[in-house]
Amino acid sequence: MKYFSFVDEKTSDATLSLVYHNMPNDKIKVYPSSDVKVCSVDADDALVAEWLDAQVVEMTEIAITEFQTKRAESEQWLLEWQFLKKQREHELISSSVVVNSIEYDADETAMDRIDRILTLANWKYNQAVAGGMPPVEAYAAVYKTTVTWKGRDNEFHDIQIESLAKAQEAAINKMKTVWEKYE
C-alpha cells in the first residue's frame, strides 16, 4: 500500500483530478481534506509507478501516519467510518462459533453469560484443590460437569463446562478478528 498527497486547484472534486489508468477503482481511495487531497493505492510497485506516470497532477508520496491524519479531516472518511462501524457492530452482534458440533452465540451478551458460569467453575475448582483434591481430579469434577445451555438454534443442549470455555475462547478470537478487520 502506498500513500500520496496532491493539490488540485482546478476542482474540489478529488476524483476528477486522478487518472485511474490501469488501476481498478477499488484499489484507490481518495480523501479530500481542507488543504490537500490524499489517496491510498493498493498495488505492487510496478503498477503504482505506471499509475503515477499517468497522473495529471503532481503526487507526493507520504507516510501512513500523515495519510491517516489528513484522511481523518475528510468528511468522506467520517461517513465511511460511520458505515464501517455499523458493519462491524452488525458482524459482532450476529457472530457465532461452533464447538463440538454445537453452535453458540458469540456476541458480548452471550460471552458475559458464559463468563458467569466459568467464574463459578473456577471458584469450585480452586475450592476443590484447596480442599486437597489433586488438580486432575478437581478439573474433571468441575469442568467435565454437564450443564444445560441454550444454543444458537434455540434448543437446549447438555454440555460440559469445558465446552463453554472452548466456546468462550473461540468467541474471543473471532471478536479479535472482526476488530482487526475494521482497523
Image (spheres, rainbow, N blue to C red):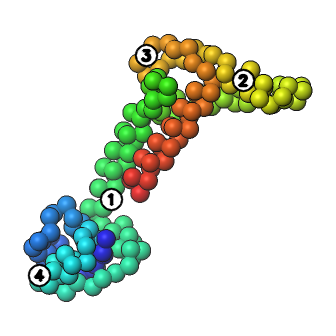
| Residue found at x 33% / y 50% | 84
Residue 143: x %, y % from top left: 68, 25
Q: How many residues crowd mark 1 within 10 Å: few (<14), some (14–19), many (20+)? A: few
Residue 159: x %, y % from top left: 57, 18
> Which residue is nearer to you in this view: 81 or 53?
53
Answer yes or no: do the residues labelled 2 and 1 have beta carbons within 8 Å?
A: no
Q: Mark 1 points at which residue?
A: 78
How far separated are the C-alphas under marks 1 and 4? 29 Å
Label 2 residue SS:
helix
How far separated are the C-alphas under marks 3 and 2? 28 Å
Q: Mark 2 points at which residue?
A: 140
* Any part of residue 13 in sight: no
Q: How many residues crowd mark 3 within 10 Å: few (<14), some (14–19), many (20+)? A: few
Q: Is residue 73 above or below residue 35?
A: above
Q: Is residue 110 left or right of residue 116?
A: left
Q: In this view, does 121 lie to the left or right of 131?
A: left
Amino acid, disc 3: Asn
Amino acid, disc 2: Ala
Amino acid, disc 1: Leu
